[in-house]
Amino acid sequence: YHYLTGAASWLMLTVLTRMYGVRGDNGNLVFEPGLVKEQFDNSGYAGVSCRFRQRQWKIVYENKSRKDIGDYEIEEIWINNMKLDEEQTRQKCIPAALLESLSKETVHEIRVVVL
């Protein structure tokens, strides 16, 4: 019944944008995770899949130090095994131009390392 009311859609949007902190901003893909340490698995990983800019994304957060929300910061961002530069990492986003250069035919993996 909740799918008919739209409540489930709002819940999924909230989980994606608030918990996992994945959202768009002027065409860029932005990361602001709000995950608590209990939401990471025993290896320190938490992940989500989504679509953005007509592409499929698998986003994995790596928290090997097992820090809690408010104690960790984004240290590195990797896309398809390519590390983003320090400025992009500091801005916590992948620029629209880079996103547009990627194929629409494959699932792209993003790894966000927090320390």
Image (spheres, rainbow, N blue to C red):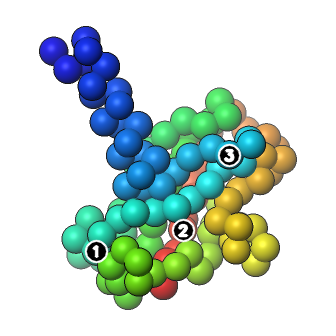
Disc 3 marks which residue?
Answer: 25
Distance, label 3 to label 1, CA atoms, is 26 Å
Q: Is residue 48 above or below residue 83?
A: above
Camera-side mark, 2 or 1:
1
Dividing the picture into quarters, in which one does residue 64 lie?
bottom left
Question: At label 3, which amino acid type do we have?
Answer: Asp
Question: At label 2, which amino acid type do we have?
Answer: Val
Residue 95 falls left or right of residue 18: right
Disc 1 marks which residue?
Answer: 37
Percent of width and height locating residue 73: 52, 79
Asked whether the beta carbons under mark 2 and mark 1 sit within 8 Å of each other, the answer is no
Q: Residue at x 69, y 71 (%)?
A: 89
Question: At label 1, which amino acid type do we have?
Answer: Lys
Disc 2 marks which residue?
Answer: 112
- The answer to whether one can see residue 44 in this image is no
Viewport quadrant of the N terminus? top left
Q: Secondary structure at mark 1?
A: helix
